[in-house]
Image: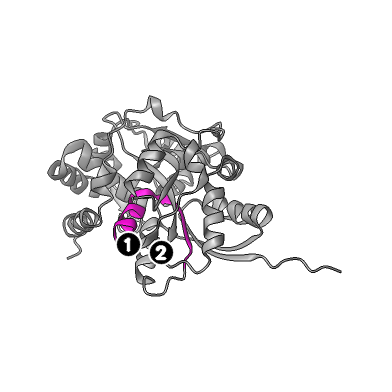
């Protein structure tokens, strides 16, 4: 009786929703015969871990989460160049991202930033619905808004960079200082604010719109807002860590993650990001980002390690009061 070939091993840090992390783990096991250890972390936490493991990498693949942090890792020599076959069918924004990374990180999805509010809580409190970033400064929303901590959350770092690009840096920090009076907490995870809004633990959660769509589809009383002034967006990405110990499996994982079949695992797991593969089907609930007023997001600048450190230091000093 023939023995089955042992499964290839792989260590993956996952920056998307837990449901998609689990679906991808199952998919690569069945389709690629890869036994992947998949750990869910926020984007900033993954960047910190990959940096800390530089001398002896324990991670093979960084999959998902905001791509500007992966651009920073690429610039620091933490990621390995790889030319997957699927880049030939990538949408233009993903092609641009791949080129910007020096071929070290590939875009797998896009998603616009916004916020969502709990319609039942809003009605109970008798408050006016917010439509713009500046509406969030209204004193009637005191202790009723959540924004994640941009040190750990790629979503919140995207919000910080978005506000800087919308208003200019000094005005953006004035805005964040005033917003701070209405912030009840700065959780670590970027999806936590909108999950808390869905459950009625806060009124308004600042998040990526696709995360709010997923919760609304699940029946939560959320109204989703693309702010009137305009907003930023993320390109979620996948990368191979330099020095990966399971390189062949890592390459196979990345190729699958960029394929139409691999990207369909997102919709199957209830996710609503816009896939980067031109042959992938758009999830029915995915927001039409062509209808949202978007900033011309400067990934080169805000994906720079020096710029990230500088902005986070200013955020900690001026907004959080952390020296």
> Element type at marker 1?
loop
Residue found 66% across the figure and 65% down from its top: 7
Q: Are marks 2 and 1 in contact (CB under 8 Å)?
A: yes
Would residue 229 be counted in the magenta stretch? no
Q: Residue at x 41, y 74 (%)?
A: 56
Rendered position, 314 above or below 289: below
Measured Cα–Cα span from mark 2 to mark 1:
8 Å
From the viewer's perspective, is residue 321 above or below residue 105? below
Q: Which residues are magenta?
A: 59-76
Image point (44%, 53%), residue name: 82
Q: Which residue is mark 2?
A: 242
Taking the image as shown, residue 55 lies to the left or right of residue 271, namely left
Q: Would you call the spot at circle 1 few (<14 residues within 10 Å), some (14-19), or many (20 or more)?
A: some
Res 293 → quadrant: top left
Residue matched to label 1: 77
Q: Where is residue 25? Give x, y as percent.
A: 60, 56
Quadrant that contains the C terminus: bottom left
Side (left or right) of 232 relative to 260: left
Mark toward the start of the polypeptide (2 vs 1): 1
Quadrant housing the N terminus: bottom right
Res. 51 image quadrant: bottom left
The front one of 91 and 139 is: 91
Q: Is residue 282 above or below residue 63?
A: above
Residue in front for this viewpoint, 255 or 162: 255
Q: Which mark is residue 212?
A: none
Q: Residue furthest bottom?
A: 56
State which quadrant residue 136 falls in. Answer: top left
């Amino acid at each position: 009786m023939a023995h089955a070939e042992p499964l290839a091993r792989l260590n993956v840090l996952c920056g998307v929703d837990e449901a998609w992390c689990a679906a991808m783990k199952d998919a690569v096991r069945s389709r690629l015969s890869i036994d992947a250890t998949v750990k869910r972390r926020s984007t900033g936490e993954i960047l910190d871990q990959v940096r800390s493991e530089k001398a002896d990498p324990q991670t093979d693949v960084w999959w998902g989460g905001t791509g500007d942090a992966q651009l920073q890792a690429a610039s620091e020599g933490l990621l390995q160049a790889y030319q997957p076959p699927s880049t030939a069918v990538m949408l233009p924004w993903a092609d641009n991202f791949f080129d910007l990374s020096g071929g070290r990180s590939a875009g797998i999805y896009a998603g616009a930033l916004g916020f969502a509010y709990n319609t039942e809580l809003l009605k109970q409190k008798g408050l006016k619905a917010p439509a713009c970033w500046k509406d969030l400064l209204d004193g009637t929303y005191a202790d009723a808004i959540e924004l994640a901590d941009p040190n750990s959350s790629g979503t919140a770092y995207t919000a910080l960079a978005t506000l800087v690009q919308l208003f200019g840096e000094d005005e953006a920090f004035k805005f964040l200082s005033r917003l701070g009076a209405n912030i009840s907490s700065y959780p670590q995870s970027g999806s936590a604010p909108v999950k808390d809004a869905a459950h009625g633990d806060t009124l308004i959660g600042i998040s990526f719109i696709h995360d709010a769509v997923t919760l609304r589809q699940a029946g939560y009383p959320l109204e989703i807002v693309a702010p009137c002034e305009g907003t930023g967006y993320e390109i979620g990405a996948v990368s191979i860590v330099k020095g990966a110990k399971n390189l062949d499996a890592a390459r196979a994982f990345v190729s699958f993650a960029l394929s139409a079949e691999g990207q369909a695992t997102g919709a199957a797991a209830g996710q609503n990001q816009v896939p980067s593969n031109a042959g992938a089907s758009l999830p029915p609930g995915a927001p039409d980002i062509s209808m949202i007023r978007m900033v011309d997001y400067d990934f080169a600048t805000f994906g720079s390690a020096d710029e990230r450190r500088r902005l986070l230091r200013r955020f900690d000093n001026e907004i959080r009061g952390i020296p």
